[in-house]
Image (cartoon, coloured by chain):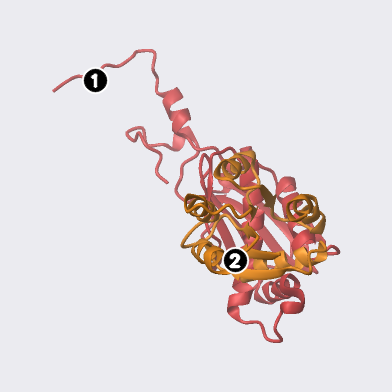
Chain colours: A red, B orange
């Protein structure tokens, strides 16, 4: 058996720091996410559409759309609204092309594109290089670590809109959380 | 002029086409493509004068489409309309031969600023 050569000055702290992913709250704040969302809403939803920074009632029939970001920070940017709000948003995006009865595909497409635009602009603020995933739509992804979550509660036309940048579940972000026998940070 | 609009989101294709009209480009023929592979095929079959393409798409990304076009000898003007407008993405786009990159969200003024020189 070969004994490992250990530098007595190497406590492992620097290596653990390098292996530790940053948390989202160190990289972006609520005001920046809100500003990105407001710009997206006014360009895509309508010039007179405003987002009010107040929490709304949590919808019973929530629908979420999100894009994943993989890079120095790993996680997802998630938009969550009530189903009826998602339909209203789809009508705003489609404008004169909105059919009398919206199908699920239109609603999911509109929600996905809003997540894509907000997520793409969040990605631009984060350290790179990063890769943006394709939009996904469905039930809200499981909540991540509270220390790696930046949540913005807004109202659009009086209805709840939540935007959350949340780290990939399971990624430890504090060096003290790391297993001292592990060299890799699990994703 | 014929403009090919490539985006995997039907909603976003409608928004791009609407913004083109709002920006004053309402007398051009518009052809739609639903991903990069579809765009590549339609560059050959439809012979557009300009391609406006999303970056992130299934089957074939926008930049893969552009690279395939240039590899096949196509010199059709190509610009990105994408949610990713970082300097890194703009550099990648320019290196691949894109004329411009319009970041989402955009409005008709953004389109006018960028497209006036290309379309004229």
Q: Check the residue under mark 2 and report the chain it is in.
A: A
Residue drawn at x 60%, y 67% is B9
The circle drawn on residue A4 is 1
> Label 2, on which residue?
A64
Q: Position of residue B79 (x, y in %)?
A: 64, 53
From where the camera sits, is residue B14 visible?
no
Could you give the CA–CA distance between mark 1 and mark 2, rounded to whole angstroms? 50 Å
Residue B39 relative to residue A162: left or right: left
Q: Secondary structure at mark 1?
A: loop
Q: Secondary structure at mark 2?
A: strand
Q: For this rendering, which residue is in front, B2 or B63?
A: B2
Residue A13 relative to residue B88: left or right: left
Q: Give the quadrant of the N terminus of chain A.
A: top left
The circle drawn on residue B21 is none
Quadrant in the picture for residue A126? top right
Quadrant in the picture for residue B2? bottom right
Tell me if residue B32 comes above or below residue B83 in the rendering: below
Q: Position of residue A165 (x, y in %)?
A: 61, 51
Looking at the image, the residue that sits furthest to the bottom is A100
From where the camera sits, is residue B45 visible?
yes
Quadrant in the picture for residue B18? bottom right
Residue drawn at x 80%, y 69% is A157
Q: For this rendering, which residue is in front, A58 or A169?
A: A169
Q: Position of residue B63 (x, y in %)?
A: 53, 51
């Amino acid at each position: 058996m070969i004994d490992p050569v250990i530098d007595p000055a190497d406590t492992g702290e620097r290596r653990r720091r390098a292996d530790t992913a940053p948390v989202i709250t160190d990289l972006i704040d609520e005001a920046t996410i809100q500003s990105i969302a407001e710009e997206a809403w006014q360009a895509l939803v309508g010039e007179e559409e405003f987002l009010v920074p107040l929490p709304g009632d949590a919808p019973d029939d929530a629908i979420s759309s999100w894009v994943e970001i993989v890079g120095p920070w790993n996680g997802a940017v998630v938009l969550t609204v009530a189903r009826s709000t998602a339909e209203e948003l789809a009508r705003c995006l489609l404008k004169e092309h909105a059919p009398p009865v919206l199908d699920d595909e239109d609603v999911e497409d509109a929600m996905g594109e809003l997540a894509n635009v907000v997520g793409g602009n969040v990605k631009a603020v984060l350290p790179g290089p990063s890769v943006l995933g394709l939009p996904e739509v469905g039930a809200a992804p499981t909540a991540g670590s509270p220390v790696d979550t930046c949540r913005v509660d807004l109202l659009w036309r009086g209805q709840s809109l939540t935007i959350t940048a949340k780290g990939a579940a399971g990624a430890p972000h504090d060096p003290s959380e790391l297993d001292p026998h592990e060299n890799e940070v699990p994703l | 002029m014929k403009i090919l609009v490539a985006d995997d989101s039907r909603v976003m294709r409608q928004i791009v086409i609407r913004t083109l009209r709002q920006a004053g480009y309402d007398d051009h023929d518009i052809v739609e493509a639903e991903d990069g592979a579809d765009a590549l095929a339609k560059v050959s079959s439809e012979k557009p004068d300009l391609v406006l393409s999303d970056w992130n798409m299934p089957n074939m990304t926008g930049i893969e489409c552009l690279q395939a076009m240039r590899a096949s000898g196509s010199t059709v003007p190509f610009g990105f309309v994408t949610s990713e407008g970082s300097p890194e993405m703009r550099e990648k786009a320019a290196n691949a031969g894109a004329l411009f990159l319009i970041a989402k969200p955009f409005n008709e003024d953004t389109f006018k600023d960028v497209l006036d020189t290309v379309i004229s």
